Image (tube, helix red, strand yellow):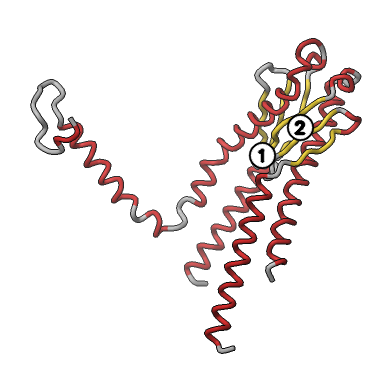
Amino acid sequence: MNSEERLYHLAKEIDARVAAVEQAAKTGESLPLVLDIGAGLGTVTVDGLGGLVSVDLARDAVAAQTGASLAGHVLRAITDAESAAATRRTSMLDDAARETR
Amino acid sequence: MSAPHRDLRLMQEQAGELDARLAATRHTARSGDQLVKATVTGQEKLLELRIDDRALHGAHVQNLGLSIVEAVRNARGAARASSLPHLNALFGKQPPPIAAPEPARREAARDDEENFEELDFLTDDEPETGGGRW
């Protein structure tokens, strides 16, 4: 293979890698992530970028809580979900970049 | 040290200072029903959530999830509104080639405005130029 052909293949490889990473970024952004709130209090949903979308509470379980205890559970669930979404997105991008190598 | 390196280093320092300032700033907002309060940093990281005990009883409990989301979004919105001018000031100046064509577009817009102002709305006379507009 001469140097021109090598350059051509290298450019194609780079294009493919960029496309795969862009696709992974899009997929990662569009996939919501749902996480349970502790003590069976419900779920929180964040978008692929980690933004809070919804908090769904189990009414019966909530009735046994105080405002402070419920707030603590929900806060932990939101921060965990946002962190998990960020980790998932990073991992998807890393995988996409690795697969095309 | 060359000028570009010096600029880059200065910008990195300023970005670091801004980051530290945002991390130390707190923004608090409530839900519309005032029963949930959220506190975030200037970087929009959720730090604290307070739920009024009244939110757990009666009709309020049905909307509690929405109120939590609303309070968090309001706090983050306030943080974003506060940090955006600082971020723009820091990064907006950066690429001079992109900023260069702007005056040309503004000139064009100003020309349009001048033509528009020259039109006489009180008479039925046709404007001298751009007759297609009427």
The residue positioned 49% from the left and 71% from the top of the image is: B2
- Toward the bottom, the furthest residue is A2
The residue positioned 72% from the left and 38% from the top of the image is: A46
Which quadrant of the figure has residue B79?
Answer: top right
Question: Could you say whether the residue bearing mark 1 is in a helix, strand or loop?
Answer: loop
In the picture shown, does residue A43 fall above or below A32?
A: above
User: Chain letter of disc 2?
Assistant: B
Relative placement, left or right, of A9 versus B123 is: right
Relative placement, left or right, of A25 versus A7 is: right
| Three-letter amino acid code at the position of disc 2 | Glu
The residue positioned 12% from the left and 38% from the top of the image is: B129
Do discs 1 and 2 belong to a common subunit? yes
Residue B18 percent across, percent down from the top left: 60, 48
Residue at mark 2: B48
| Three-letter amino acid code at the position of disc 1 | Glu
Relative placement, left or right, of A37 versus A29 is: right
Residue at mark 1: B44
In the picture shown, does residue A101 fall above or below B31?
A: below
Which quadrant of the figure has residue A38?
Answer: top right
